[in-house]
Image (tube, grey):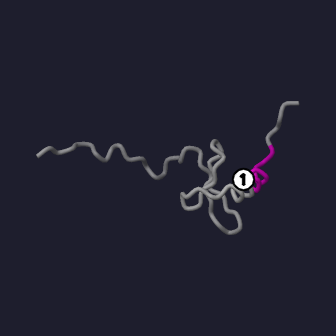
Amino acid sequence: MVIKKNAGIARKKASQPQNGMVNFSFANVSYQIDPSRRKVYHRWIEVETAKTCQIMGAWSQSRPQEKRAV
């Protein structure tokens, strides 16, 4: 019988950042936004494209404006 040692080390901690994912509440529903991929998820299922555009627009408007070079 072979015993695997250190099998639990490969697990990630739940408290670690989730690759830049952002939690955002839209119309009283919680969504997860991945700004780098421009994807929106609800309960970790990708949201349809039309709604993604709507949610990403609301999220970008809620963020503080970044100063841009002139």
Compared across the picture, whether 4 is left or right of 25 comes to: left
* Relative image position of residue 45 (x, y in whole percent): 55, 58
Which residue corresponds to the image point at 70% horizontal and 63% vertical from the top-left? 26
Question: Relative to 60, is 48 on the left or the right?
Answer: left
At x 65% / y 58%, what residue is drawn?
Answer: 48
Along the horizontal axis of the image, is 1 left or right of 18? left
Which residue type does callout 1 highlight? Answer: Met
User: Foreground: 49 or 16?
Assistant: 49
Q: Quadrant of residue 10?
A: top left
As drawn, which residue projects farthest toward the bottom? 28
Q: Main secondary structure of the magenta part?
A: helix
x 67%, y 62%: residue? 25
The magenta segment: 56-65
Q: Count the labels in the image.
A: 1
Q: Is residue 58 magenta?
A: yes
x 49%, y 47%: residue: 16
Location of residue 42 by image quarter:
bottom right
Note whether 3 is above or below 69 in the view shown.
Answer: below
42 inside magenta stretch: no
Residue that mark 1 sits on: 56
Q: Return the x and y of residue 69 as percentages of the image width and height.
A: 84, 31
